[in-house]
Image (tube, rainbow, N blue to C red):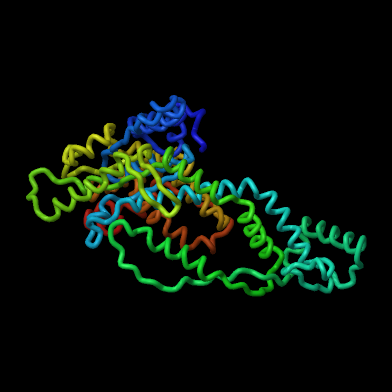
Amino acid sequence: MTLPHSLTPKEIVSKLDEYIIGQDDAKRFVAVALRNRWRRQQVEPPLRDEIAPKNIIMIGPTGVGKTEIARRLAHLAQSPFLKIEASKFTEVGYVGRDVESMIRDLTQLAVNMVKKEETAKVREKAAAMAEERLLDLLVPPSPRAAGPHAVSLPEAAGADAGSGAGNTREKFRQMLRDGKLEEKLVEMTVEQAQAAPLVEIFSSGGMDDMGSGMKDMFSKIFPQKKEHRKLSIAEARVILEKEESEKLIEMDKVIKLAIQRTEQSGIIFLDEIDKIASRQGAMHGGAEVSREGVQRDLLPIVEGATVTTKFGMVKTDHILFIASGAFHLCKPSDLVPELQGRFPIRVELNPLGEDDFYRILTEPQNALIKQYTALMATENIELSFAEDALREMAKIATEVNQMTENIGARRLHTIMERLLEEVSFNAPDMGGEKFHITADYVKKQLRKISESEDLSRYIL
């Protein structure tokens, strides 16, 4: 399992600063939580197993960076990461739904992640084996040694046995490596995807994994059909490399590593946790009972339980849970006491102001200005923004958030699309032009809409 050994809390915060503006307190807390994972690995058993992760509740309005902080943290830690809305468990038909499904989903993500890493390790060997199979297609061996993929081609028809065939094979090898045969067609046998028989299962609690399990079972009972197809060398290489990689990868090892990674470094982001809190002073009706019931279902998972997945048993004791919510109509203390105790760290994220919006537009590595400039560059348009234009956009975003619903930094996406609508539409006909966005252009495009509260609600 890969852990961010070398990243200190300061370095983690510095990495987060490259993509997220402000919210220093939240960054510090998640940085410490990530570092504590590494510290725990240095502690000798059995005390190591007693050290539980310090789960976090992020409190703040939408669009201030809660999800992005958790996602970037998982990327830094090379951890399997799952974002799930806690409110989905209160929807009609989902009350009492098996909340263990999120652990199954997280484990599947970990298996995919480890399999991708293992594939990368054997890529060179798989490529070499695929090359040999391509050569078998291009220069068939003698009849006794011919394999199922062998096919006669005019280029190879006159090849002599022995050294002549060997020389021909090496010539084709060189042509393959030089990319001279990419469009050449070869005939080969490929597996045909076969749909499993349709079986409808009425799922209830504890049966969320049944569907994928049935698919796996039917795939073994009904083996995949094979068909002969003519493919270009480029297409055949992709298929053959994939087949060879599958042979080289030990799935038992992949699953073992994936379960270990899930248990030791998995991160689950529980969004909208305030939606399942029982609101203070509310009547104890069905909705309130439902919310408390969902909390009771979540509690054992957060506390530490063993969940059955199709890959094996997965323990949740050391998975890091990061919850978030706006908490407009309730507060964290409205959660059931047991669940509160499992989220000891609470951090409030600040609403975003005009200066924050300006920095979001310009500073991050994935800043919106950089994204739109790159998009327009694909049409051979050199897009640029004046300083006062950026300030005006930040000002309008702040004003619209104040007049209407405050959706945080997401407002900037709407404003950018509205601002560049004309340029984006006409871009294919403007190739080679330079387009400079000024404050006057921003006012012309946006001011009429932003100053009308009714229009802002519908358009911005």
Q: Is residue 282 left or right of residue 414?
A: left
Between 126 and 398, the one nearer to me in the picture: 126
Which quadrant of the rendered structure holds the C terminus? Answer: bottom left
Instruction: Give the residue at x 75% y 67%.
Output: 147
Instruction: Give the residue at x 61% y 48%.
Output: 120
Between 132 and 200, the one nearer to me in the picture: 200
Position of residue 16 measured from the top left corner of the image (x, y, whole percent): 43, 35
Between 151 and 44, the one nearer to me in the picture: 44
Q: Is residue 246 left or right of residue 350?
A: right
In the image, residue 38 sits, relative to residue 267, either above or below, namely: above
Position of residue 167 measured from the top left corner of the image (x, y, whole percent): 89, 60
Between 351 and 301, the one nearer to me in the picture: 301
Residue 444 in sight from this viewpoint: no
Position of residue 273 measured from the top left corner of the image (x, y, whole percent): 25, 46
Position of residue 19 measured from the top left corner of the image (x, y, whole percent): 44, 39
Instruction: Give the residue at x 43% y 25%.
Output: 43
